[in-house]
Image (cartoon, rainbow, N blue to C red):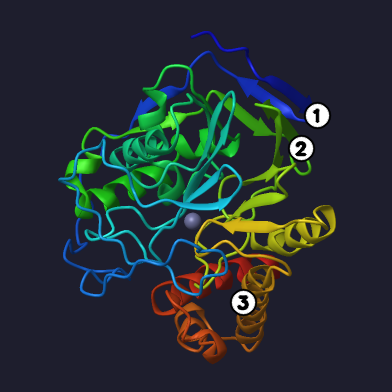
Amino acid sequence: MHLIPPLLVVLAIALQTADAALLVPVDVPPLEGAEPEQRFGTDANRPYTPPADVVNHPRAPVFAVDASAPETKPLPVYRIAPDTYFLFGNIAEVDAVNRGFNGNAGFIVTDEGVIVIDALGTPYLGRRIIATVRSVTDKPIRYLVITHAHPDHYYGAAAFAELPGVKIISHAGTESYVYSSTIERSVAYRKVFLPREMEGFQAVVPDILLGGGHPARLTLKLGGKTFDLYDVGHHHSHGDLVLHQVEDKVLWVSDLAFNGRVTYIGDGHIEEIAPMQDWVKKHFPDLALMVPGHGAPQTAPFAMLDFTGNYVRALRARMQQLHARGLGLPEAVAQAGLPEYSREPLYELNHWINANHVYRLVEEEAF
Ligand SMILES: [Zn+2]
């Protein structure tokens, strides 16, 4: 079947396109010192599946991934808006139970084909997303949009690079991430928990790289629907995108807001979070639904934006205060606790890492 190419509208952006996504081997041994039996938030003894209506649901599923299941087995999927489907990730860091299904993904079906948003944490899970799409529609997958190049959103992309006719789109920062030492450490770490899934891992340099800074935009027209992709800077990673389903009033906001867990701050530029959140509030006044990278989709007034923004502001203020009092890094981190967030999922795991990172930023600013 021949398909009419969708209209690509490019506005005020730096756009690089290639004929095909590039696969780059990341050949590193498993990281020494990490313990494969450690669990980071996924409790396989407490399986829990949310009901079909997951919008505004307070609790994420506990979904243990059976890596011996065939790649053709669909993952659980929820319909959250017309023709819009959502894969609800575990609230966790990667471990041998969730096997890299610790973030959300989703897809939108149109008459001319499917747009997938994010690829989950391994090529195996990427292939199971493809199987999930196949369980809903026989329309071809036309695009994979990677919101940012963190492993839980991106490492499944190689599965899509193997599919004919799929264009992979990401922020231009993805390319620099592929050639960074960060990816080597990340792959080495994942090999401890997921040796089989990460064997022979190849990173993907997407076909289309969107850059040029905020508010650069790329518009995809597919099946009579409009999909606007925006460069929202580097607030959380080497480069972050959001996707707006214009007619359906849905915004895939990725990790600009976390719903029901503490954020992770290990790279990116946290001073960009507040301006980008403010821009979202102003630019999409009639939004019906916001879909985060972690936690449930949410309706207005989108409390998760302030939940994430307030946490980052409180952490920054605390680290500035401790730095101003002359405390060094270890002492400052030891006193960085924020009791009002301490009961939030992933606080114990992420907060001290975040405090460490933010202290270093504060220290840099002081010089
Ligand atoms: Zn994430």
The residue beneath circle 3 is 311
Which of the pair 225/151 is nearer the observer? 225
The residue beneath circle 1 is 11
* Residue at image location 72% in from the left, 67% down from the top: 300
* Residue at image location 64% in from the left, 62% down from the top: 270
Residue 296: percent from the left, percent from the top? 52, 64
**Mark 2 sits near ligand 1, with its Cβ under 8 Å away:** no
Q: Amino acid at mark 1?
A: Leu
- Measured in 3D between alpha carbons, the distance from the residue under mark 3 to the one under mark 2, in whole angstroms, is 27 Å
Residue 202: percent from the left, percent from the top? 33, 31
Assess disc 1: are there few (<14), some (14-19) or many (≥20) residues with their C-alpha within 10 Å of its C-alpha.
few
The residue beneath circle 2 is 216
- Measured in 3D between alpha carbons, the distance from the residue under mark 1 to the one under mark 2, in whole angstroms, is 7 Å
Sequence-first tag of 1 and 3: 1
In the displayed structure image, the side of residue 310 where residue 72 appears, left or right: left
Sequence-first tag of 1 and 2: 1
